[in-house]
Image (cartoon, rainbow, N blue to C red):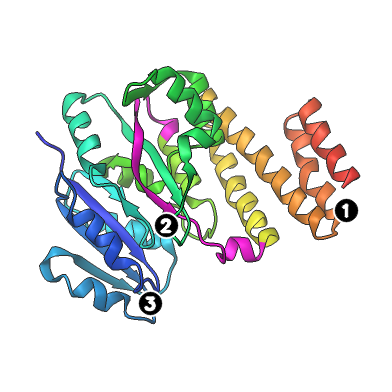
Amino acid sequence: MNPRFSVIIPAFNSAATLARAIESVRTQSWPAHEIIVVDDGSTDATADVAASYGEAVCLIRQENSGVSVARNAGAAAATGDWLAFLDADDWYAPDRIRLHAEWIADDATLDCLTGDYEYRDEAGTLLGTSMAQHASGRMMLDKAAGSARVVMEQPGEIAAFVADHFGDTHTLSVPRARFIELGGYPTGYKVCEDVHFLARLVAGSRRIGVMCQSLGVYLIHGGSATRRDVVAAQRENVRTLADLARLAKNFPAPARQGVALRMQSARYNLGCALSRSGQRIAAVNAVLPTLAARPGWQSLRDVVSMLKG
């Protein structure tokens, strides 16, 4: 049976970009089973834009509760057997759904799928591609050896992907039943909630399909909240990963290792942000837990780098 894709678009004050996102789904070469827009308490015309599509778009409205709650609400309402997600300021490549749907139809053993995507700025300039910019992505590109499809299944591949994944939310395809079983995206976190879900998903997966071509565009905002207050964003990143690390104690070894590496990187990035803001002691304290959790030269080097500023 051909997979039916429910595409979920969380939107908050996204009136200026939502139509582009919706149109990128409506014009797919493999039609979506349904498009669900979850208006997360917008104060602009976001809901009006979604409503203007009539029955072509299912509109859900909720009080402002965050992107995780919005995605989970869309998943709860979905009637397709596979879920795909798209943020309101990003957009899909024309064959995004087809490339995954045909592979699912060909191989029923795939637990979930992901793929490459482009980074573009607000002027539309191509800034790079995700797989080429992440070590885990380059690993899979080498394994693919020019093929469009490659399966992630080896322990080292899993660990590298969890540590620094190349597939963002809008390239992820996951069975709805599996999404519900995992409890969806974690609520109460503003940063790294996608990594939290992805790591839990990957920890229980054996074969992950990777499409080595662009499935969409991730828009880089120069004035995003994470860029305006880097220290706060990095603190929130560590907080989210701390909860993931708690859960990772029960993960298979590769996923557990990936979470530990990601946490080390997050603590280091927080230390760098604090150091740049002149908070040297706080920077050292940010990375010290890594020395206890993962004793070794790399952890010691992180501490020394904070001491040197």
Q: Which of marks 2 and 1 is nearer the N terminus?
A: 2
Question: In the drawing, what numbered circle is on residue 281?
Answer: 1
Specify start and end residues of the magenta stretch as a single range.
Answer: 202-229
First reached walking from the N terminus: tag 3 or tag 2: 3
Q: What residue type is labelled 2?
A: Gly
Q: Which mark is residue 124?
A: 2
Q: Which residue is drawn at 15% across and 44% down?
A: 30
- Residue 249 in sight from this viewpoint: no
For label 3, the crowd category at 10 Å Cα-Cα, with few meaning under 14, some 14 to 19 and many 20 or more, is some
Left or right of 191? Residue 270 is right
Residue 193 image label = none
- Residue shown at the point (47%, 39%) measured from the top left: 130
Q: Residue at x 66, y 44 (%)?
A: 266
What residue is rendered at 48% in x and 30% in y?
A: 137
Question: For this rendering, which residue is in front, 129 or 241?
Answer: 129
Q: Residues within 10 Å of mark 2 (few under 14, many from 20)?
A: few
Image position, residue 36 (x, y; %) = 23, 61
User: Which of disc 1 and disc 3 is earlier in sequence?
Assistant: 3
Residue 32 vertical position relative to residue 50 in the rendered view, above or below: above
- In the picture of the structure, the residue carrying the numbered disc 3 is 42
Give above or below for 297 relative to 227: above
**Viewer-closest of 64 and 146:** 146
Q: Is residue 274 visible?
A: yes
Secondary structure under the numbered disc 3 in the rendered image: loop
Give the distance between the C-alpha atoms of the residues marked 2 and 1, in whole angstroms.
Answer: 41 Å
Q: What residue type is labelled 3?
A: Ser
Q: How far apart are marks 3 and 2 (CA)?
A: 25 Å
- The image shows residue 200 at horizontal and vertical percentages of 45, 38
Amino acid type, label 1: Ile
